[in-house]
Image (cartoon, rainbow, N blue to C red):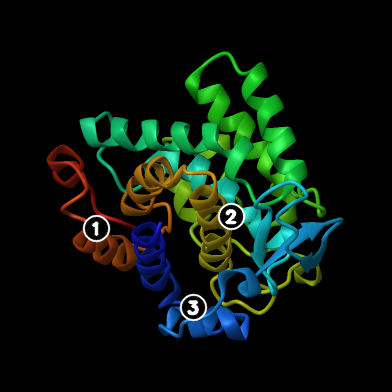
Amino acid sequence: MASLRLAILLCLVVIAIVDSKLLLHRKATEQLRGTAIDISDLMATLRNGRLEPVDTDAGGPESIPANILPNDLWGIHDLVLAGYGAVFMTKGSEGASETQKAAYALAGMLPKVHPYEPCRKLTQQALANATSEESAVIAVADASWACLPAKFNEHSFDAAYTKDSLGNYDRANSARNPSVLDVSVLGACQRSAWPRTCSYWSSLHAMAFRADALNLGTEFMHAVVPLLASGSTFCAGCTLHFSALHDTVLSKSFMRDQAAGF
């Protein structure tokens, strides 16, 4: 479990470098700096949109850092859907196919690792009704917006990556840095200059905790690493550096099939 946490923290540091205005909980910041703290003191349970102390005897690991609200997790939609779109991969390539399989794998894990309980239920329903891999990814992505308290949809943002953006370079490019129109519904990401990056950080942090606690760490890492290395951050520099740090775990075909960013 320690190796999973170390790997996840490395991923998050790379992404969070571009977001100096991210409002981190003090203890979460201390953890990233290497200060030893009690993980049970760091985590808090989400119930009815509020944060309460963890109760390990009442439903298991349902926890996220205290500054993060459920609405901050909207980026899970983009991580799954834009991940499936393989925005910085060569179209039709073996590497792009690997990325899509990773997105589908993450979509399939959300009924277990999504930090917000209503979203675990809704994503499960979306998977049950899907008729193909692509329809499952689209349905789960939409469910991961609709299940949050703000009930997000494409009109909740100044630009949004949607199913119509799949395989469409111009549409994807127009949604490279979307902002939530009503930032009052957000918590840690309310003032972020990089809203999607902030949401990714918040979501990965919280999902990694659940994956670790549920012994799904290996599967979670195998799904997330290709998605971040294939352009789901919509940041060419971030993708380049992340790929360089993880080239030993990414396949040769994946590294070969990476394409230029925006």
* CA distance for labels 2 and 1: 20 Å
Q: What kind of residue is marked 3?
A: Asp
Image position, residue 198 (x, y; %): 55, 68
- Nearest to the observer: residue 210 or residue 59: 59
| Residue shown at the point (43%, 47%) measured from the top left | 217
Q: Which residue lies furthest to the right in this view?
A: 48
Q: Where is residue 98 in the image (x, y as percent from the top left)?
A: 30, 33
Name the residue that disc number 1 marks.
243
Say how many tags the image has.
3
- Cα separation, mark 1 vs mark 3, equals 19 Å
Q: Tag 3 or tag 1, which sits nearer the N-term?
A: 3
Q: Is the residue marked by circle 3 packed among few (<14), some (14-19), or many (20+) residues within 10 Å? A: some
Residue 71 in picture, x, y percent from top left: 73, 59
- Visible residue check, residue 146: no
Instruction: Describe residue 109's horizontal placement relative to residue 120 as left or right.
Output: left
Quadrant in the rendering for residue 235: bottom left
- Which residue is identified by label 2? 75
Disc 3 designates what residue? 19
